[in-house]
Image (cartoon, grey):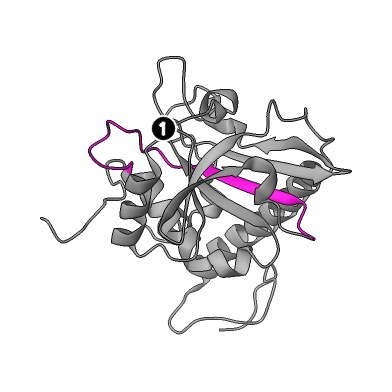
Amino acid sequence: MEALDGDLHKRHWPGEDEAYREARNTLLQAEMELERHLTAVVKLRQELPLGGPVKEDYAFAEMVDGKEVVTRLSSLFAPGKEALVLYSLMFAPDDEVPCPACTSLVDGFNGIGWHLQDRINLAIVAKSPIGRIMALAESRGWDRLRFLSSGANSYNADYGAENDEGMQIPALNVFVRRDGQIRHFYNAEKLYIDEPGHPRHVDRLWPIWNMLDLTPEGRGEDWHPKLSYYDK
């Protein structure tokens, strides 16, 4: 097939016709414009001024060498790494199981955890006791992430990971340590906007949705990640 006037490159696929190529060129132009816009949004995010100082040096529970210890927020910053990302897994003490969607997201984080932690500090926070969290981590094969319990502090309430009734919320927060002070930098605030459907506040971090978006069927209206696909 010869190149069309609107072609952006010379690659064509076996059996494609002009209708497909014209539609694909239109989509490709939109994809390029979207990427330029996303790049601009990233720049806006990176240029945010620092937020407020943290309310307190939160004391989390952590399991180290089989023993429960107290881990302060300040100790989560490794030397040379000023950014800390905390993702709040919806798993309260009285929940029979964790949130399946959160679990699928943490599955992905675990797969790239060693790459991320070469550059940033990263941990997963949940309200359940640390022993229960670690039992979940072992059952899921989460071996490249750091897990913390916020059961004994107000972190979840202070940083948007639970509502006034104590319901857990899948918040993602970024903190920065500069000049000896820890300050809030970013929260994925789309989570709190009342929009129809999934809030999509962490979609760019979630391979499941990005992969499904490449297909004609897309995400589907009723499909959601599950804890297991072998119990049907």
Residue 136, compared with residue 19, is above or below; it is above
Any part of residue 38 in sight: yes
Q: Count residues near mark 1 (Cα–Cα under 10 Å), then give few for <14, some for 14-19, many for 20+.
A: few
Please state which of residues 130 and 97 is positioned toward the viewer in this rendering: 130
> Three-letter amino acid code at disc 1?
Gly
Quarter of the picture holding the C terminus: bottom left
Quadrant of the frame with the N terminus:
bottom right
Q: Nearer the viewer, residue 123 or 106?
A: 123
Residue 86 forms part of the magenta stretch: yes
Q: Is residue 39 left or right of residue 73?
A: right
Q: As displayed, is residue 41 above or below residue 218?
A: above
Q: Is residue 97 left or right of residue 158?
A: left
- Residue at 53%, 23% (x, y): give it: 157
Q: Which residues are magenta?
A: 80-99
**Would residue 220 be seen by someone viewing this image from the given angle?**
no
Q: Which residue is mark 1?
A: 197
Mark 1 secondary-structure assignment = loop
Where residue 46 appears, x then y in whole percent? Answer: 79, 46
Is 89 covered by the magenta stretch?
yes
Q: Nearer the viewer, residue 153 or 208?
A: 153
Q: Residue furthest top?
A: 164
Please say if 9 is above or below 44.
below
The structure residue drawn at horizontal position 46% and vertical position 15%, both measured from the top left corner, is 164
Residue drawn at x 67%, y 34% is: 57
The image shows residue 123 at horizontal and vertical percentages of: 55, 51
Q: Main secondary structure of the magenta part?
A: loop
- Describe residue 210's horizontal placement relative to residue 9 as left or right: left
Q: Nearer the viewer, residue 109 or 152?
A: 152
Q: Position of residue 39 (x, y in %)?
A: 75, 53
Instruction: Count how many numbered circles sit on residues in the image.
Output: 1
| Residue projecting furthest to the left | 232
Percent from the top left, x then y, of residue 141?
35, 65
